[in-house]
Image (cartoon, rainbow, N blue to C red):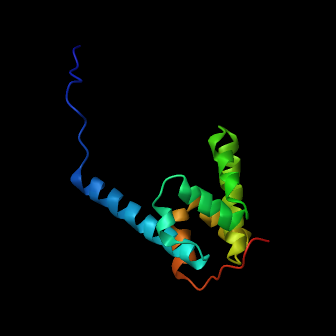
Amino acid sequence: MYSDYSAAPQMPAGLIVFSLLLCVFSLVCMWKIFAKAGEPGWACIVPFYNLYVEFKITWGNGLFFLLMLIPGVNAVIGIITMVKLAKVFGKGGGFAVGLIFLSIIFLPILAFGDAQYQGVQ
């Protein structure tokens, strides 16, 4: 059987629009979270610098973001960072689990809710 792989795969236009809207919404949420923490909101747009700022907000030292470059370790550090993000905004363990597994729902709650940045503890 002969298959022709010369044509590029097509994605439905609705899926592309939905994905772009989801990306923009995530950026807006991170912008608000950074602003609540006293950091510049535009930092969420710049690659690598956004990780530096997020680690500065959660860990107190932005250079810990370099741990995300180590395969295997990055998954553990990412989970710990989400737990710390919940903690620095005064949220508990249940909220941290929500950030880990349903971040598209819990990031807007953090961004637009009444949570206040309490600093690294």
Q: Is residue 29 left or right of residue 69?
A: left
Question: Residue most toward the top?
Answer: 1
Q: In this view, does 15 lie above or below 87?
A: above
Q: Quadrant of the C terminus?
A: bottom right
Q: Image point 35% across, 57% down: which residue?
A: 19
Which residue does the image show at 60% across and 77% down from the upper left? 38
As displayed, is residue 78 above or below residue 95? above
Where is residue 59? Give x, y as percent.
73, 62
Residue at 45% x, 65% y: name it. Answer: 26
Q: Is residue 115 above or below residue 11?
A: below
Question: Where does residue 93 sit, x and y in percent of width and height?
Answer: 73, 68
The one nearer the camera, 61 or 33, is: 61
Q: Which image quadrant for residue 88? A: bottom right
43 or 81: nearer the viewer: 43
What is the tally of numbered marks visible in this picture?
Answer: 0
Q: Which residue is drawn at 39% across and 62% down?
A: 22
Q: Residue 35, position in %: x, y?
A: 54, 76
Q: Position of residue 51 (x, y in %)?
A: 58, 56
The quarter of the rendered structure image containing the N terminus is top left
Q: In which quarter of the image is residue 11?
A: top left
Q: In this view, does 1 lie to the left or right of 44?
A: left
Q: In this view, does 27 lie to the left or right of 18?
A: right
93 to 116, vertically: above or below? above
From the viewer's side, name the closer residue of 29 and 4.
29
Query: Is residue 31 toward the left or the right of residue 58 in the image?
Result: left
